[in-house]
Image (tube, helix red, strand yellow):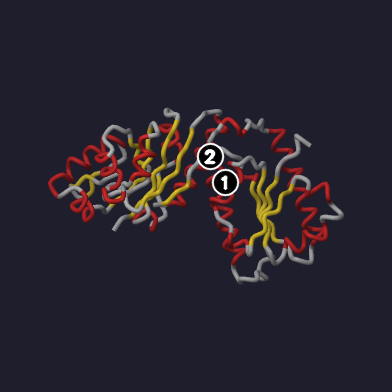
């Protein structure tokens, strides 16, 4: 399991968390490396949150929200899409392959599709890992020494 | 009114990689409003430098800190002083006034300007007094090399 890529999935509470729930029993192998972070809406996603996930050692980040037009908060998934695009630009500026971050729109009733998407994304990240030799994240002390304080 | 934007990562990274420990100093007032150097942008820059350092195999230890204003000595409290004294260099994401005023307060420490901005004339006189404006801007120009004279008055970095 050591060469398995670590995927952080930021999931909307109203669709993908419910959609992904029943699939855990059927696709346990996928969820071994996909770690779900539940958000009240993908509109809650922040660029800092995505970048921090990469800094902490994630190989790939997927943001899974409602289908376009069916967001519980009307436009949260559209805002998330814009932020993901912005985060891709920032990753590219930092010499990280922006393909390691993707956004998906999956409805609550599409549990199997969520499992399939997670599996495909894992394969995609695994291929990228093989292509790009990853340097061990322990070389940078930012994660452990970073201090966020505001006076 | 302050209008600012952050300098490109390559420029900041090339200056940060010369130091082992770097403080990213943000400002919670004008540059936060124009999304150039507030607490959130400090976090973004820290993450970008971390990721870039990982890709290039460099070792840079970062400390993030955001104060209410960099153009007023009232806000340089003990916690800020302690953090400044503990690092090798400081990247200031404050505006042209802050990036001048903070080094004038912490004279021994190397400051790296992290933003490009304009329209500072009103704040200059409050922070420095009107007669020091030209000296401060000239020093800033020498420090960053990014300033452009605007209508006969040098513009801060």
Towards the viewer: B50 or A70: B50
Q: Which of marks 2 and 1 is nearer the N terminus?
A: 1
Q: Residues within 10 Å of mark 2 (few under 14, many from 20)?
A: many
On the image, the x and y values in percent for residue A51 come to 57, 46
Q: Left of B131 or right of it: where is A14?
A: right
Q: Residue furthest right?
A: A26
Q: Which of the chains bears the disc numbered 1? A: A
Q: Which labelled disc corresponds to residue A13?
A: none
Residue at (82% x, 55% y) in the render: A24
Q: Left of A29 or right of it: where is B139?
A: left
Q: Which of marks 2 and 1 is in front?
A: 1
Position of B131 relative to A95 (above/below): below
Residue at (39% x, 52% y) in the render: A151
Q: How far apart are marks 2 and 1 (CA)?
A: 13 Å
Circle 1: element type: helix
Q: Which of the chains bears the disc numbered 2? A: A
On the image, the x and y values in percent for residue B83 come to 39, 39
Circle 2: element type: loop
Q: Mark 2 points at which residue?
A: A94
On the image, the x and y values in percent for residue A119 come to 78, 48
Q: Which residue lies furthest to the front in this view?
A: B78
On the image, the x and y values in percent for residue B125 come to 18, 52
Q: Which labelled disc corresponds to residue A52?
A: 1
Position of B30 relative to B141 (above/below): below
Residue at (34% x, 56% y) in the render: B30
Residue at (20% x, 53% y) in the render: B126
């Amino acid at each position: 399991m050591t060469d398995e890529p670590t995927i952080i999935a930021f999931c909307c509470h109203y669709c993908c968390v419910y959609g992904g729930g029943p699939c855990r029993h059927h696709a346990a192998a996928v969820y071994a490396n996909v770690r779900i972070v539940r958000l009240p809406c993908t509109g809650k996603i922040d660029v800092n949150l995505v970048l921090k996930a990469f800094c902490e050692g994630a190989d790939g980040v997927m943001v899974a929200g409602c289908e376009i037009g069916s967001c519980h908060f009307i436009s949260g998934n559209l805002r998330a899409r814009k932020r993901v695009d912005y985060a891709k630009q920032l990753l590219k500026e930092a010499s990280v392959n922006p393909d390691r971050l993707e956004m998906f729109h999956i409805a609550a009733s599409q549990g199997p599709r969520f499992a399939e998407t997670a599996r495909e994304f894992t394969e995609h990240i695994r291929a990228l890992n093989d292509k790009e030799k990853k340097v061990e994240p322990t070389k940078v002390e930012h994660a452990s020494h970073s201090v966020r304080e505001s006076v | 009114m302050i209008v600012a934007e952050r300098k490109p990562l390559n420029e900041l990274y090339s200056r940060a990689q010369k130091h082992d420990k770097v403080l990213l100093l943000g400002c919670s007032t004008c540059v936060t409003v124009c999304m150039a150097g507030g607490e959130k942008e400090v976090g973004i820059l820290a993450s970008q430098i971390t990721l870039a350092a990982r890709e290039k195999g460099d070792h840079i230890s970062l400390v993030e800190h955001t104060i209410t204003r960099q153009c007023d000595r009232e806000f340089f409290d003990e916690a800020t002083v302690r953090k400044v004294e503990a690092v090798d260099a400081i990247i200031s994401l404050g505006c042209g006034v802050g990036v001048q005023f903070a080094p004038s307060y912490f004279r021994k420490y190397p400051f790296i300007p992290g933003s490009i901005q304009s329209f500072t004339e009103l704040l200059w006189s409050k922070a420095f007094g009107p007669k020091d404006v030209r000296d401060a801007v000239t020093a800033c120009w020498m420090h960053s090399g990014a300033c452009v004279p605007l209508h006969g008055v040098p513009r801060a970095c």
